[in-house]
Image (spheres, grey):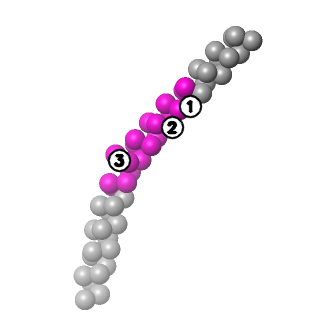
Amino acid sequence: TSKSHTVLTSLTFTMNECQKKADEFMSNCLEPALEKYMSEIMGMKMADKM
């Protein structure tokens, strides 16, 4: 039915938007923070071993 199609389309759009926002959060927030943290920790550990 038309109503079912509309609901499915809306749900799919919402899920796609949610995935897009999750991807943006990952690439703009989590990845840079993790890279910075890892380089600082690894840098300190490497310096300690020298």
Where is residue 4? Give x, y as percent.
71, 15
Which numbered disc, 3 or 2, marks the residue closer to the eye? 2
The correct choice, above or below, for 11 with respect to 23 in the image is above
Question: What's the CA distance linking mark 1 and mark 2?
Answer: 6 Å
User: Residue at position x 60%, y 27% from top?
Assistant: 12
Task: Name the residue beneath numbered marker 3.
Answer: 29
Q: Residues within 10 Å of mark 1 (few under 14, many from 20)?
A: few
Task: Name the residue beneath numbered marker 1.
Answer: 15
Question: What's the CA distance linking mark 3 and mark 2?
Answer: 15 Å
Residue situated furthest top in the rendering? 2
Using the image as rendered, state which of residue 5 and residue 40 is in the foreground.
5
Mark 1 element type: helix
- Which of the two discs, 1 and 3, labels the residue nearer the N terminus? 1
Where is residue 35? Give x, y as percent.
33, 61
Q: Are marks 1 and 2 in contact (CB under 8 Å)?
A: yes
Where is residue 6? Give x, y as percent.
64, 15
Secondary structure mostly taken by the magenta-highlighted segment of the chain: helix
Residue type at numbered disc 1: Met
Query: In the image, which disc is placed on residue 23?
Result: none
Identify the magenta region. Answer: 13-33
- Check residue 35 for magenta coloring: no
Q: Are marks 1 and 3 in contact (CB under 8 Å)?
A: no
Left or right: 43, with 12 as reference point: left
Residue type at numbered disc 2: Gln
The correct choice, above or below, for 21 with respect to 35 in the image is above
Task: Name the residue beneath numbered marker 2.
Answer: 19
- Which of the two discs, 3 and 2, labels the residue nearer the N terminus? 2
Using the image as rendered, state which of residue 48 and residue 24 is in the foreground.
24
Residue situated furthest right in the rendering? 1
Residue type at numbered disc 3: Cys
Q: Quadrant of the N terminus?
A: top right
Instruction: Find residue 21 and report its image quarter.
Output: top left
